[in-house]
Amino acid sequence: MTSLNAIVPMLCVTAAAIAAMIAEAFRSPGERMPIGPLGAIGLTGAAIASALLWDHNASSFGVVTADNFGLFVTWVLIVVGLLSLAFSGPTVARERLPQGEYYALMLFAIAGMMLMATASDLLVIFLALEVLSLAVYVLTGIRRDSATGIEAALKYFLLGAFSSAFFLYGIAFTYGVTGSTRLDRIGSLIAAQSLAPTPMQLLALGLLFVGFAFKVSAVPFHMWTPDAYEAAPPAVTGFMSTGVKAAAFAAFARVFLTAFEPLKAQWGPVLWAVAAATMIVGSVVGVTQSSVKRMLAYSSIAHGGYLLVALLAANDIGKGAVLFYLLAYAVTNLGAFGVIAVLDNADRPNDRVRDYAGLSNDHPGLAALMTIFLLSLGGFPPLAGFIAKWYVFSAAVKAGYTWLAILGVLTSVVAVFFYLRIVVMMYMTPSDQPVQFPAVPRIAGFALVVSAVVVLYLGILPTRVLNWAAASISTIF
Amino acid sequence: MPFPILTSLIVVPIVGAILLLLVKDDEQHRTMLRIGAFVVTVLVFLQTLFLWARFDPASADFQFVERHAWIPAFGISYFVGVDGISLLLLVLTGFLTPLALLGSWESVHKHTRAFCMFVLLLESAMMGVFIALDLFLFYVFWDAMLIPMYFLIGIWGYERRVYAAVKFILYTMGGSVLMLLAILGLAFLHSTVPGAGGYSFDLTRIDQLQIPPNLQFWFFLAFALSFAIKVPVFPFHTWLPDAHVEAPTAGSVLLAGVLLKMGTYGLVRFAFPLFPLAASFFAPYLAGLAVIGIVYGALVAMVQPDMKKLVAYSSVSHLGFVVLGITAMNVQGVQGAVYQMLNHGISTGGLFLIVGMLSDRRHTRLIAEYGGLKNVVPRLVAAFLIITLSSIGLPGLNGFVGEFLILLGAFRWSPRLAACAATGIVLSAAYMLWMFQRVNYGPVSNQKNAGMMDLTPREWVVVVPIIAVAVLMGVLPNLFLRPIEPSVSRLVSRVQAGAPARIQARARLRSEIAPSFGAASQPPATSYQAPATSDQPR
């Protein structure tokens, strides 16, 4: 059994997903079944399993490595999963979405993400990427009667398939150059080869880069993001914008900072430009959006840019910064989407910025929570987003990427403008007509409060998590 | 362990704000909320007074120091302390916050609980800015303070409040993010020094760094830009009239009284001592901008039809004096600057409170709407007059001492700049008195003013302390200057030691132009002892 250790967390989640499917199959129409809690049990099991695996550096089949780096990301994914389950409840119930399918897809996606975060072989990374992507494509279009949902899902699927092809070609070329798909072997082989990289190596590198850039929605591969984020149900959007990003960044970091580290002179400048473009486009275009979900889609693009900066800096701080940022961003962003999910409403989607006018009168608590999340996204102290940004920019300054850091802080000021637009609506603009915002379901409300507490905790007392993040990266890089 | 009094300055308002959550926010409980918040702020004020009483005025060191590791991996600590420069700013903050609450007592009708909470949170952050001795901690408070102020302006302000609030927060943040990078740069520089022990954001350690001139240049620019926007120094001042005019009375009072001081405080505490070479290079330019601000602010104030806007532009002018005093970087100049920060807090805070009282009664701030108030509300006008005179700098009131010291210091450095700045004093008399005359003298031209109410008991509680402090600071300046002096002397000598060229230039100036002013170390305060104060406690 020892060889299975490293995949136990994934097994827990997969088991929960299968259980959800079976439960759905035996559910008589109209019967209410607690399928969401089933997923929560699976995720809790995964959390315990990964806690037990900590510091053991377990490896399964030579292609999945549960090192601390992967486990940290696994925890982030578990947090993402638990919060997403909590926020999904109201949407699933109201939209009459097929419960079993919905939760099973979400759990399969999480299993895929976990695999992606711990995989140490390019083919397994590809496998994980496909598992999670397919589930997320379907989740994007889960509202079958919504034309925009179907359109966005198709667009996402086509572009995603395209990028998967790039990625697969990249793997093929890498195999052609090095004769292996194992990351450690690729790394040592590339390092051993001549100083000047061959065109084949560069081609492999470029193709893999495009594949990852698509998944982390880096400019110019970000086009699908706003459409997919806008059309999917808010809980799904929150899930995609944090989970997919966390998994993709984990794999991105692992592949580029271990296997392709020797070629950093080649990919470094490209990543520099992509990071700069991502930050600029994300924050500047976000300013012009009138849909909250689209706005947050651009915000998540911009945040991807900050993560790319940390990845590029790639010093001891930068690697830890990627992990801390992923956690802080996941909790904050999911919280924001959780608020949207709670307000989402069949006859009034509450997605225009204007729809938030007067929210502080009807739901002062909800408005306050949303403000905390938005300010954290904007990088205000004493919230998680500030520490995360500060960590990233420290890494950049230390690594000598001063201009990138300057660009980063300036774009974050631009982004503050659109986060504040929602705050302005909630607090400073009276609503045109009296609106009834829906009541807040208890579980979702509880999850929102927990997220806000975590955001404050990470902002005020970040030491412990920072140390974990630092300890996580020391094992592999 | 001694009682952590500085931490309690931060914690008490936060706890108070949380406790207010327990009170229902409706009609019946409104007064209870206000009283609760008021009691908390008075408590904080008493703490600051206690701090002052226990402060050792002979020492230039940081006192009441508390230090706890916060993020040890980066050398970030919770490190707070006060010296003579920050002590009285804390007292000022403690003094103005309850008055600001009283000033907005009646005019805040909606969301009273949130209003009180934001004022308390703002007070906590303001205290934090003045006591933080760790650069990271300082930045945290510096930015955190924007949020409550943003809400105060945006929710309870006047017509264009949203525009003003967003402009305020974006301007200030835009300036400060570059300072964050400079702070990071300093910490990394510290980590490159062998044996220094890695990263550190500790001000007292970063003080010891030998920063290469080219880095000083950039770091100083980043810090100075951030502070210059906050002050605001001339070309960066455009957010201020909007924010001041649109903010509710409490917001304007705290904005003018305390927040603007953070910019000048930052210059004194961080920008000049950390980067003396760059500071000496930039000082003439900064001083030039300050003088432009003095004259420009005064001229623009003169033509304002709106009282609040007039006071706002007068702030630009008055803070120009403070910056001028700092750039002179001699004991008189800096001491005058610190003193003037307090003065400006008292007199401009007072003016905003008075304007708030008028606008509570008449719901307008336009000068043209008033006239002849002296006949209707003589007591209010009397208070108005005293505070106006204190703002102009009439001898015997607080404003005079600060401006005089600053001009003295500036003259020793650059007589030309001092001469230009002095015109600001004349202009300030012109625009303030002209405004006062149009509002209060003459016949009652507008019948709506005829039935105005004079000072209510609550308003008496607001104006009496302000006037008392204005008089006290005018006749007993030594009481306030004594704790400031040691810290300022040390600061000045440190900056001068770091910028040798400047000392020579100054020495030359002194010998050629102003030989009569004596040695720099001579405590200047002695020359202000009014006869009536000879029995003051020593």
Image (spheres, coloured by chain):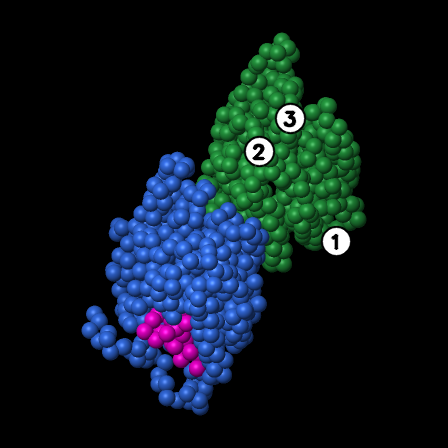
Whether label 2 touches label 3, CB < 8 Å:
no
Give me the residue at 69% from left, 25% from top: A142
Colour displayed for chain A in the image of the structure? green
Q: Which residue is mark 3?
A: A346
Which kind of residue does numbered mark 2 sit on? Pro
Could you tell me which secondary element the residue under label 1 belongs to? loop
Q: Residue at x 72, y 23 (%)?
A: A144
Please report contact status of discs 1 and 2: CB closer than 8 Å, yes or no. Answer: no
- Label 2 secondary element: loop
B111 vs B56, left or right, is right
Residue at x 28%, y 69% (from the top left corner): B479
Q: Which residues are magenta?
A: B391-411
Which label's residue is closer to the chain start, 2 or 3? 3
Number of the front mark, 1 or 3: 3
**Which of the chains bears the disc numbered 3?**
A
Q: In this rendering, is residue B405 above or below B203?
A: below
Q: Are marks 1 and 3 on the same chain?
A: yes
Q: Residues within 10 Å of mark 3 (few under 14, many from 20)?
A: few
Please tell me if label 2 and label 3 are on a single chain. Answer: yes
**Numbered label attached to residue A169:** none
Note the chain letter of the blue one: B
Q: Residue at x 52, y 49 (%)?
A: B154
3D distance between C-alphas at marks 1 and 3: 59 Å
Q: For residue A222, what is the image quadrant?
A: top right
